[in-house]
Amino acid sequence: MEFIYQYAWLIPVLPLAGAMLIGMGLVSYGKTVNKFRQGSSVFIVSLIGAAMVFSFALLWSQIQGHPPYNRIIEWAAAGDFHLTMGYTIDHLTSLMLVIVTTVAFLVMIYTDGYMAHDPGYVRFYAYLSLFSSSMLGLVISPNLVQVYIFWELVGMCSYLLIGFWYDRKAAADACQKAFVTNRVGDFGLLLGILALYWATGSFEFNEIGDRLQELVQSGSLSVGLASLFAILVFLGPVAKSAQFPLHVWLPDAMEGPTPISALIHAATMVAAGVFLIARMFPLFEGLPDAMNIIAWTGAFTAFLGASIAITQNDIKKGLAYSTMSQLGYMVMAMGAGAYGAGLFHLMTHAYFKAMLFLGSGSVIHGMESVVGHDPVFAQDMRLMGGLRKYMPATAITFLIGTLAISGIPPFAGFWSKDEILGSTFEVNPILWAIGWLTAGITAFYMFRMYFMTFEGEFRGKNDSIKNQLKNEQLQRLGLAFGPGAMNSKELTTDVPELHDHEAHEGHHSDTPHESPATMTLPLILLAIPSLLIGLVGTPFANYFEAFIHPPGEEAIAGFPPLEIPAEFEWTEFLVMGGSSVGIALIGITLASLMYLSFKIDPGAIAKTIQPLYNLSLNKWYIDDIYNAVFVKGSRRLARQVLEVDVRIVDGIVNLAGLVTLITGEGLKYLENGRAQFYALIVFGAVLGLVLISGIT
């Protein structure tokens, strides 16, 4: 099996080669390459499929007890400074390789159906392949410099994919917002990397943690300074994994095509932050202050995302806030020292959240035949309802994902979320309480989403709801119907997103339809791990915990015996598991009473708790605060700097030019060519100097 490790570099190189070939073809022979749509997609999918097979082989080898493999080459050297590149294959790497390649493979198959009629079909596949290569390169990186290079490449690909439909203003704004917000976190990460190198003299993961602990213990470096370095590094995961306060980019990123929401914003890129925390766990675990900040950031983000998701009507944005909340769980687990629990939830969440996002894309695809391609209509759950009758495969898989994320046994989410809550309770009961309450809110908003989308009567032909949605959109743009509203011609000119030809383009059916097999097959395949993969981490036979272990701990080769450990405490398991399932069932019951049987009026409850409802609906006003402070503030500062530039800087330059001009104009009359006149001027100047010196 050694040859597999020697050629493991092919895993990121294969999709990179596909992206380069397709990309160069599009640049050089765009029209010709665009004609080979199916051939291009088959080529890209085949390469990621080969990388997936390679990844499974590495995972199996690691399970069987193969020692970690490192291949390092010296990339640059100057005196004592040495910069290395290469790749490392260990338990964490092999697990992440399988997660990334399996989700990417299924998403690329799904893309063939979802983007079938898009003119940018081939370009989208090139972007997907480039992103997959960047993410795989990040996973196998052996040091912080290489991680940072691929970290930025992943961010660039995210920018390209979020803004894929760049002719839509909302998509163009969203990709810029994601780019700028992530630059804030990435700058912190860069400062942290440089600070750690200054302190330890190394970029290598297997050296930084030990050297930093030695410096702290010897007194050469204070704990506070070491914690500051760790927090700077943590800023990178805060932005990439959409943690508060750098979470604001993720919901807007839903403006991109749905396949990238499933690949990037559910299973891979946003999980890169959690992966980096896991990779640098030896650094963080020895610094209690840094661990506390990580844990509380994750806990607050989990609650924040769940509280906002309650009032979302856009199906993709609801799932985006759900993703933000679940990532908060993972970060909280890492901060609480629950290394295995955090990664276990990363794995289960990758599969069921990818399925939920792809399911939402299937719903949107079916709705577009009724309401057109305007996302205002196609993505709003108030126009859905009753889709289970028209889209049974999508409905069943979406229900499986909803049960998994709600933490209902035996679905995957129950085992991983329960592991996090149990581990957190041992460290800090307050963190557990936040996670426990968030679990109930999660079950509520996810079943609200399921009931509004798939149960009840179909509302897609309800013109009053459409007018309400259009009016809400116009109000967000600063317009409103009424006596002072613009006429239809002005609306068509100033609000291109709401053109009638866009809103009704593709309207050719009175009822939604099930998606093609290329879209439903990935949903069905993702439903299998969403249902079963949690069984590898049960408390009875925790294969996952035996395989994934913090760096420095000895791994167990092969599979542990399938038996209940003698020290297993049934009472603790039943109390902790029962409490999390109980709060989830309460959330499901409330959702069914409000959105299935309608025995409770959601509108009446919203009026009763109007301030809390508005807080959730307006996303805790965080976006408004950022807009007022940073966006408008930076524009105000830019205008003031412009004034200084125009009036002072340019004024000084212009004044110097004016003085030179006037002086030159005056002196030219003294340049008459007569030597006697020049001598007289010299004599006068000397006489003046003599008189001045005599007076003083």
Image (spheres, rainbow, N blue to C red):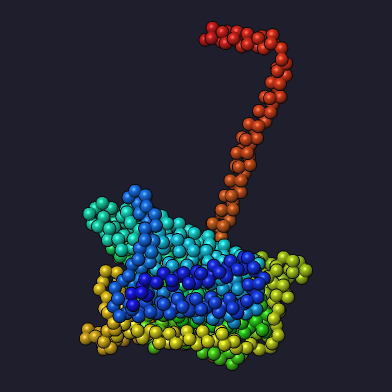
Q: Is residue 536 visible?
A: yes
- Between 479 and 570, the one lying in front of the other is 570
Residue 177 percent coordinates (x, y):
55, 63
On the image, the x and y values in percent for residue 264 come to: 50, 72
In the image, taking residue 62 as reference, residue 32 lies left or right, namely right
| Residue 416 position (above or below residue 216) | below
> Where in the figure is residue 39, as x and y percent of width and height?
59, 78
Visible residue check, residue 131: no
Left or right of 541? Residue 166 is: right
x, y (%) of residue 260? 54, 74
Residue at the spot 68% in from the left edge and 80% down from the top edge? 372
Q: Answer above or below: position of 669 versus 217.
A: above
- Rendered-image quadrant of the N terminus: bottom left
* Residue 594 horizontal side relative to residue 555, left or right: right
Q: Residue at x 54, y 67 (%)?
A: 20
Asked where in the image residue 383 lies, by quadrant, the reply is: bottom right
Among the 4 quarters of the image, the one containing residue 467:
bottom right
The residue under the point 62% across, 77% down is 37
Taking depth in this image into account, of 8 and 530 the one nearest to the observer is 8
Q: Where, by quadrant of the figure, is residue 409 drawn?
A: bottom left
Q: Residue at x 62, y 80 (%)?
A: 116
> Is residue 598 depicted above or below 18 in this figure?
below
| Count of numbered badges drawn on the protein | 0
